[in-house]
Image (spheres, rainbow, N blue to C red):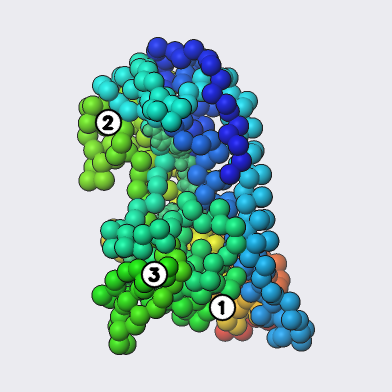
Amino acid sequence: MPVEARSDIPVPLPDEVDVAIIGAGTAGMAAYRQVRKHTDRVALIEGGPFGTTCARVGCMPSKLLIAPAEARHRLAVLPAFGIHSDAGTVDGRAVMQRVRDERDRFVGFVQAAVEGFDPAHVIRARARFEDPHTLRLQLPGNGTGGAVARLRAGRIVIATGSRPAVPDMLRAAGDRLLTSDDIFDWDTLPGSVAVFGAGVIGLELGQALHRLGVRVRLFGRGGELAGISDPAVRERAVGILSDDLPMSLDARDVTVSRDGDAVAVRFRDPGTGPCNEPFEWVLATTGRRPNVDDLGLEHAGLERDGRGVPVFDRHSLRAGDSHVFVAGDANDDLPLLHEAADEGRIAGENAARFPEVLRQDRRTPLGIVFCDPQIAFVGQRHAALEQAGVEFEVGEVAFEDQGRARVMQVNHGLLRVYGERESGLLLGAEMIGPAGEHLAHLLAWAIQARLTVGQVLEMPFYHPVIEEGVRTALRLLNEALGMGPHPPPRCIDCGPGA
Ligand SMILES: Cc1cc2nc3c(=O)[nH]c(=O)nc-3n(C[C@H](O)[C@H](O)[C@H](O)COP(=O)(O)OP(=O)(O)OC[C@H]3O[C@@H](n4cnc5c(N)ncnc54)[C@H](O)[C@@H]3O)c2cc1C
Ligand SMILES: NC(=O)c1ccc[n+]([C@@H]2O[C@H](COP(=O)([O-])OP(=O)(O)OC[C@H]3O[C@@H](n4cnc5c(N)ncnc54)[C@H](O)[C@@H]3O)[C@@H](O)[C@H]2O)c1
């Protein structure tokens, strides 16, 4: 990792501030910028390295690993275009060198931003509540444990992020057990990895490693995959992705043990006999836990939920009717980068204005999984609509015959869109398919603008583009809502393969 941007500049610590922010990640830095607009009496407290989870061990290095994997995988479609190539040999050291170099560049941008903050505001320490308004600061030591200081704060923003949660059953892998915090520092690619947890991180990293030539098996639970809630989309996703990546999404009787330097994974897939597969490494991608357990929250006088997170209002980020605000992964609501930034802004603004606290609209939910084909969620999920008893209809398009997708040899997937029966409002979508990141944005913007399905269909659609597939799904949805005619099976006005 790059050197710390900020040395421990001997700046006198304040005794008291208007707002203390715990954690200088994405949410904490966004909060700091807001607070600065109102007061100079602010402390941004960071107990770990600067650079944010996103840049250091999250969004950016994971996408840097996925990019070469996708580039290599595209070589497999070349013969279908009549092109033959024997390229594709993987130089693991070069792959990981680029991942680390580019990662360090991104981390450097964040560190430069921190360098731009007033040094008097930035405190290198781990913070814990001693009472609702007092933080105990454990300052960095020189190997012998650092000094302790105390800071009184009128308001406090908790923006402490999250960390990998590792189940005990994987601990037997010993020093062969890794998390996403470790792998981007690899010097080279390993030979084999058992990836436990078929959520977003497991799927993204498991598929990328597999496509870079690492022997991978993705172990899941109960058939879940990347949080897809629509059973039709999940079934399609499992079909497409398991064609390529070895998966045991409902592995039973799993045990992990060491066999010398290797890790033996014993398991049973439904309908098969017992298997015993050796791996060099075990990668735990079994979820993340909010960093609230070591904050002394029992001294903060806040009501907490079952995971120990202060009960808070997602429109103000305020914990109960207190002076404490909880933003980003720490609140365990929507652990995504853009949400952490939004929440930091709202929490910072409210902490600064306190006791005036404003409730703000939140954006339309949007989630993108950078596997290939991409998985995406927009607006209300299928399961949530069903659970809430919303009366809705579904329109769908399969991408196998979609014109542009076929031209490009990316014709795999299924998009399902949901619309409200009475109003015709577009409510949500789940998908696996080509250009998922772009289609998901279009749909999210339409939902946030509160457009009906009919109004979205009034928008321009070019030809031949993958967005024509969205139009097909929306036309079928409009018909199901009783608000549009049955679309012609081979739509002439839209050109072939729409
Ligand atoms: C592998 C991976 C891939 C991801 N990919 C994506 C993606 O593609 N898109 C996306 O939207 N999201 C992605 N995410 C999620 C995204 O990275 C997080 O939602 C986001 O970074 C959370 O930001 P944050 O500010 O809440 O936390 P962080 O950036 O983790 O900041 C929290 C800070 O608090 C500090 N801290 C903790 N406790 C204390 C304490 N007691 N005292 C002082 N400081 C403390 C920590 O050291 C840390 O610096 C990914 C995550 C992972 C792990
Ligand atoms: N592209 C993106 O936007 C992106 C990428 C990566 C991470 N993230 C964020 O990070 C969060 C955390 O991701 P994650 O993948 O760690 O968590 P997750 O909650 O999405 O998935 C964890 C999975 O592990 C499974 N699991 C738990 N214990 C298990 C066990 N013992 N054996 C097998 N499976 C087990 C769970 O059932 C679940 O399916 C995501 O919810 C997401 O918000 C986003």
Residue at image location 37% in from the left, 34% down from the top: 326
Q: Position of residue 384 (x, y in %)?
A: 33, 59
Residue at image location 49% in from the left, 53% down from the top: 182
What residue is pinned by disc 1? Answer: 412
Give the amino acid type for the residue marked by disc 3 in the picture.
Gly
What residue is pinned by disc 2? Answer: 296
> Any mark on residue 260, and which?
3
Disc 1 residue: CB within 8 Å of ligand 2: no
Compute the Cα span from label 3 to label 2: 41 Å
Q: Position of residue 418 (x, y in %)?
A: 43, 65
Q: Is residue 9 visible?
A: yes
- Label 1 close to label 3 by CB (< 8 Å): no
Query: Looking at the image, is 449 positioned above or below residue 169?
Result: above
Instruction: Pick the quarter of the image with the N terminus.
Output: top right
Give the amino acid type for the residue marked by disc 1 in the picture.
His
Q: Secondary structure at mark 1?
A: loop
Location of residue 276 by image quarter:
bottom left
> Any mark on residue 498, and which?
none
Q: Is residue 398 left or right of residue 175?
A: right
Give the amino acid type for the residue marked by disc 2 in the picture.
Gly
Residue at image location 47% in from the left, 51% down from the top: 181
Query: Looking at the image, is 181 positioned above or below residue 470?
Result: above
Compute the Cα span from label 1 to label 3: 42 Å
Tell me if mark 3 has few (under 14), some (14-19) or many (20+) residues whose alpha carbon lies within 10 angstroms of its own: few
Query: Looking at the image, is 137 positioned above or below residue 167?
Result: above
Q: Secondary structure at mark 3?
A: loop
Q: Secondary structure at mark 2?
A: loop
Tell me if mark 2 has few (under 14), some (14-19) or many (20+) residues whose alpha carbon lies within 10 angstroms of its own: some
Which numbered mark, 1 or 3, is in the foreground of this view? Answer: 3
Tell me if mark 1 has few (under 14), some (14-19) or many (20+) residues whose alpha carbon lies within 10 angstroms of its own: many
**Foreground residue among 238 and 123:** 123
